[in-house]
Image: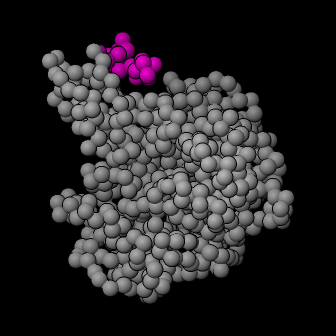
Amino acid sequence: MVTDLTEINKRPWYPFYPQEVREQMETFTFPEIPVSRLLESSAKYYPKTTALVYEPENFLVNYRELCSLCERFASGLQNRLGVKKGDKVAIYSRNYPEVLIAFYGMAMAGAVYVACNPLLIKAELEYQLNDSQARIIVISDDMLPVLREIIKERRTSLETVIVFERDKEMKQRLLCKTPGKYALPFLKYSDVFSDDPPAKPKINPPSDLVGILYTSGTTSYPKGVMISHFNVVSSSIIYGTTYTGKFPELDEGGFLKFTNFAKDLSREWEYPFRYGIDSVLSVPPWTHMMGFQGQLIFPVMAAMTIFPMPAFDMDSMLEMIRRWKIAFAGGAPQMMAALLSRPDIDRQDISSIRAWTAGGNPTPVALGEKFEKRIGGVISEAWTLTEATMSSTKNYANKSSIRKFGSVGIPLPYTEVKIVDTETGTKEMPPGEEGELIQKGPSVALGYWNRREDTQAALKDGWLYTGDLGTMDENGFFYITGRKKELIKYKGYNIAPRMLEEILYKHPAVLGCAAVGKKDDVAGEIPVAFVSLKEGAKITAEELMEFVNGQVAPYKKLREIRFIEKMPLFATGKLNRRALIQML
């Protein structure tokens, strides 16, 4: 549901929208179109713009060719594998071109994308496949050992495993069939494609899902966030206004037409992004909301040239920025700090970057000011969460807008955010006073897959209760101060403490335990566990960490264990996590 403009017009941040944005908001209506229409629109209006470049596979296609590839993949899913609207198709891979083609092919077929982080270990992946009831999974060849085990044990609903060979198969001209094949239920990626025309299922954008993206909660297992086509399309549009200042037009055929202000195509630009011209270095994983919405969906909508980066390597990233004149990149403040700390930073040319998107953790003022001097454009800091389809608050990226480092900006257009008391969640707090951030608007997801109680707890009267704590200043700029929920945030990934604690409790020496986040300049927070041992038990911190870390994905690993005699409790008997954090 789109927030009532009459309410937003009264909010303190409304005057801080650029004037041209305020004027367009009065008449703009969000189009109810499927996500695949974003790609089809770019193919219509920017057919010859290079869509995808991946050097290891010597692969380069324009938007017309990319759209054709995705249509052929969609046809294969439908005509060869029997995929119907609403079927769940998982992807378990890093950022490779095959993933982008598979995702948009799935969207065209009406299938639901189940995002499986490539860092998941077997048990975690098996859980998500069972929870989502995925029928098909697309994987890179390095994931084969894990999937062979899962298929052999027959504990999921998987029927087909589509395998692509990294850095090999795409060298064939537009995915022509290559020799060799796998034994069923494994299927070679290139064998999926079909030249038969794909069926076009009737999509109801506000209610039909395009994806299920998993987020860690404070419960022991992740929850699947249900993202609709309307969530993704509206989020991409309002996200784009912060970089272009313009809303799109809907043409007579139902396609979106994006254009820039004339000034922004000159040297004296105001807004950084140019449709059909600029490029993006896609580093965050497309299985994570920041990568999915910000660097898989938005760049395609904007007809940008996408340079996928499957594994982060700073030297490679800097070389690609210099050689290809990358215009758009982003990452957590820790990445910015790591770049600036390089001894050779003065010899690195990153001046082509017109906009750097920062998120995950607040950007310190000194870091933001120093980093912005190194690039040719601006830093646009934001705050959001998976349940908001990556569109909550943001600092506008045009040069004349007020941007405050340390602040996560103002709510995006058509989005309302309030600070409410943490006790009842009903009393709105005045400027400067801390409370929980709640959000309403078109990007708020439909809820959690198969979790009615969790959905009811998070969504109340149209408001998303985020669990994040913060303040709002008199101008309507928001600041994140902490979290009501107990998540540990490591390099942008959410880690549920309870999951680590349940593993610790399995060890016979552990009497009590609690996992908390310890502040870290590089990672944001690192997982640390406080442990009390049973009487007479003897075990080292290293041995206990080895026990836990062998059962979780790499980013969830404990980095430190501290032994204490007794866990601190409130008078009610509940664990006092704040006391543990103070001990750190």
Task: Report x, y in % for residue 177.
Answer: 38, 85
Left or right: residue 245 compared with residue 123? right
Left or right: residue 80 compared with residue 302? left
Count numbered badges in the picture. 0
Where's the C terminus, which quadrant?
top left
Q: Residue at x 51, y 76 (%)?
A: 59
* Residue 55 visible in the displayed image: yes
Instruction: Name the quadrant containing residue 217.
Output: top left
Task: Report x, y in % for residue 322.
Answer: 65, 61
Q: Residue at x 40, y 70 (%)?
A: 166
Residue closer to the observer: 386 or 445: 386
Task: Report x, y in % for residue 284.
Answer: 51, 54
Q: Is residue 479 magenta?
A: no
Start-end of magenta stretch: 566-584
Q: Residue furthest bottom?
A: 195
* Residue 78 visible in the displayed image: no
Question: Looking at the image, is 437 positioned above or below residue 41?
Answer: above
Q: Residue at x 82, y 47 (%)?
A: 400
Colour scheme employed for the rendering of this structure: one colour
Left or right: residue 514 compared with residue 300? left
Residue closer to the observer: 370 or 345: 345
Q: Is residue 578 magenta?
A: yes
Task: Report x, y in % for residue 351.
Answer: 71, 55
Residue closer to the observer: 196 or 576: 576
Q: Residue at x 16, y 29 (%)?
A: 508
Instruction: Name the quadrant containing residue 502.
Output: top left
Name the dominant secondary structure of the magenta segment.
loop
Residue closer to the observer: 258 or 149: 149
